[in-house]
Amino acid sequence: MFSMIAASLVFAQLAMPVTLEQDRLTACMDEAQGDPATAIATANEWLEGTSGPGRSLPQQCLGFAYMALLRWEAAQQAFVTARDARLVDDYLARARLGGMAGNAALAGEVYLQATSLLLRAEEDALAADQQTMAGQFATDRARALVALGLESEAAAALDKARGFAPQDATIWLLSATLARRMGDLENAQNWIEIASLLDSVNPAIGLEAGLIAALAGFDDTARASWQSVVDNAGGSPQAAAAQLYLQQLDEVPAP
C-alpha cells in the first residue's frame, strides 16, 4: 500500500501552481504524519464554511490522517469525497484521488470496492491522457481481483496494464507470477525475462525467475537465479526465500 511519503508525492502533482490553500494542505499533511488526531481536527475545522471544489483539499488531509491511524475505511471515504468535490472535467486530480481511495480499500481488504474505485481511477487517468498512471491503477485492480480469487479477470487487468505502462518492470513481474500460478509457464517465462531486462537488480524478479525455471524442470537455471539473489541481495526477505529454495533443490530424496 502507499505510505504517507508516497501520498505526499501524489499531492505534489495534483494541482499547480501552488496556492495558499495548497500550502495549507501541505501543512495539514505534515501534521497528519506527526499528530494525526490533531490533523483530523484541523481538517474538520477547515471544512467549515467550504463548499464545492474547495472541500477537496481538507478532505484529502482527512484521508492522510486516517491513513496514519490505519483507519482504512475512513480514509477511503475521505478520498472519495475529495475526488467527488473536484470539477467533473478535472480528470487528473480525480484519477489520483480515486487511486488513493482504491488503495485505501485494498489496505482495508475491501477488495470488491477496491476494484470499482480503481477501475474508475483508471478511466479518469486515461481521460487525462496519463497512460502510465492508468497502468498502475490496472495493476492495483489486478491485486484486488487476485484477492477475490478472480485470476482470469486479474490476468485481463494486467494485460491492460502492460499495454498502458510497458516500461514498468513490476507489472511484468506480477504478470509472470500470476501466469505461473495459473500454470501458463510459457508466458510466465516470457514475461519474467522482460521484467529482468527492465530491472535486472530487483531480487523479487530473480526469485520469481527461479521458481518459473524450477517448475519448468530447469534446475540449474533455477539454482543460478536463486544464488544470484542470495549473493546480491543478502539480508533481504527475497534472499532468505532464495536460500530456502536452494536448500530444497539440493535435498536428496530419501530411498
Image: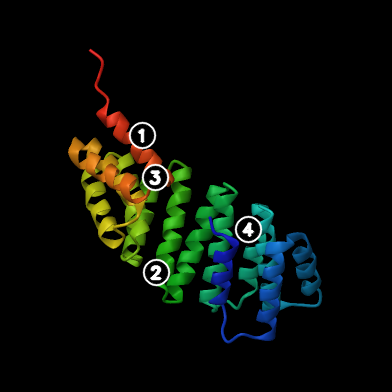
Which residue in the structure is indicated by mark 4? 76
4 or 3: mark nearer the eye: 3
Whether residue 62 is visible to the viewer of this picture, yes or no, is no
**Amino acid bearing label 4:** Gln
Which quadrant holds residue 29? Answer: bottom right
Q: Residue at x 76, y 64 (%)?
A: 40
- Residue 112 location (% of width, % of height): 53, 49
Q: Secondary structure at mark 4?
A: helix
Q: Quick one: label 3 or label 1, which is nearer the N terminus?
A: 3
Q: Specify few, some or many for label 4: CA neighbours under 10 Å numbering under 14, 14-19, or 20 or more.
A: many
Q: Quick one: label 2 or label 3, which is nearer the N terminus?
A: 2
Which quadrant holds residue 32? Answer: bottom right
**Amino acid bearing label 1:** Leu
Which residue in the structure is indicated by mark 2? 132
Q: Is 122 left, or right, of 5 in this rendering? A: left
- Residue 26 location (% of width, % of height): 66, 75
Which residue in the structure is indicated by mark 1? 244
Which residue in the structure is indicated by mark 3? 238
Q: How many numbered marks does the figure carry?
A: 4
Snapshot colouring: rainbow
Q: Are marks 3 and 1 in contact (CB under 8 Å)?
A: no
Q: Quick one: label 4 or label 1, which is nearer the N terminus?
A: 4
